[in-house]
Amino acid sequence: MTRFERFAVVDWSGAKGSAHKGIALAFCEAGNSAPMLVDPPGRTWSREGIADWIEARAGEPLLIGFDFSFAPPRIARGSYLPGDAVPDTAKAFWAYVDALCDDADLGAASFLETHHRRHFYFGAADGRKADFMHLRACEAHYNAGGGGKPSTVYDAIGAAQVAKASFAGMRALARLNRTLPVWPFDPPPASGALIVEIYTAIAARAAGLRKGLSKIRTPQALDAALAALGSAPHLPLARYDDHATDAIVTAAWLRATALRGAYWKPQPLTDEIAESEGWTFGVL
């Protein structure tokens, strides 16, 4: 996979509406120059705007990382939404989510709040939170290896929840996969762009940041993290918020990690997992 010459990371958001302060896009070239933020076409990025930016570069040697879950768990329970008639492969499920939702800007809040409400935890009225804590094979493997327990897409409450972002992301994948391959659901192409799922916490650990202390909010901390990943110092930012610094650090990590063949063939990744749940790039 040394053919990639450009790398991009999207810090994603599932928030309602069409303008999202929580979205950041960082981009870098091969080599060691620091990733830079890409300015949105307006004041803030929309999810549609991110999709437009990526589609315009489908033919480039570009590796793109998104930080949301590309599918819900299916292997452990035999269904994404047990008891409901839903597809059992990821690509078909993306299309199902997209067809069911008419939320603005590829949003998917209605999927959780209305269409399949009983599968998601929004608070104590839904019962025991532990009953909703289902993980994908990749997430369970990461946790068993000491990486920590990732959030589940069925937990829709609190600042750390990834549910809305992930289902909005599945709508984005339904659109983007028309013209771009998505690993590992598709094999890496001989040319052109490729989309992978990333987890910013993995990049933070590789940059020397400890669990629970991985957020970067100063220029000094950002340069230290970049140096640990073999990157030159960054150009000054207007604001050092979590979204911007997560995207920048993870883009530098993706550039370094994409060259390592083992990450493209993790031993636990079976054909069934690749088709139904996918895999987070960087988890061995």
Image (cartoon, rainbow, N blue to C red):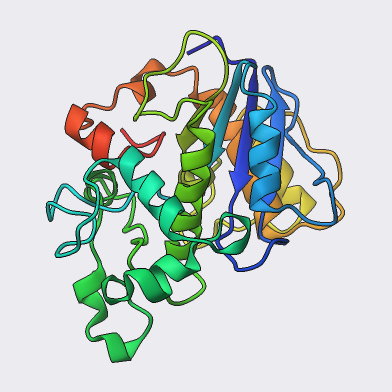
Please report the residue visible at 66 percent of the width from the left and 48 percent of the height from the top.
48
The x, y position of residue 89, in whole percent, is 25, 40
Residue 121, by quadrant, is bottom left
Q: Is residue 122 above or below residue 6?
A: below
Which of 264 and 213 lies nearest the eye of the viewer?
A: 264
**Residue 201 visible in rendering:** no
Q: Is residue 237 above or below residue 21?
A: above
Please report the residue visible at 87 percent of the width from the left and 54 percent of the height from the top.
238
Which of 197 and 174 lies nearest the eye of the viewer?
A: 174
Which of 143 and 66 lies nearest the eye of the viewer?
A: 66
**Residue 172 visible in rendering:** yes
Q: Is residue 172 above or below residue 110?
A: above
Please report the residue visible at 53 percent of the width from the left and 26 percent of the height from the top.
179
Quadrant containing the C terminus is top left
The x, y position of residue 58, in whole percent, is 62, 23
The x, y position of residue 32, in whole percent, is 70, 22
The x, y position of residue 157, in whole percent, is 43, 77
Which of 205 and 257 lies nearest the eye of the viewer?
A: 257
In this rendering, would 159 be left or right of 152? right
Please report the residue visible at 41 percent of the width from the left and 34 percent of the height from the top.
281
In this rendering, would 96 be left or right of 208? left
Q: How many marks?
A: 0
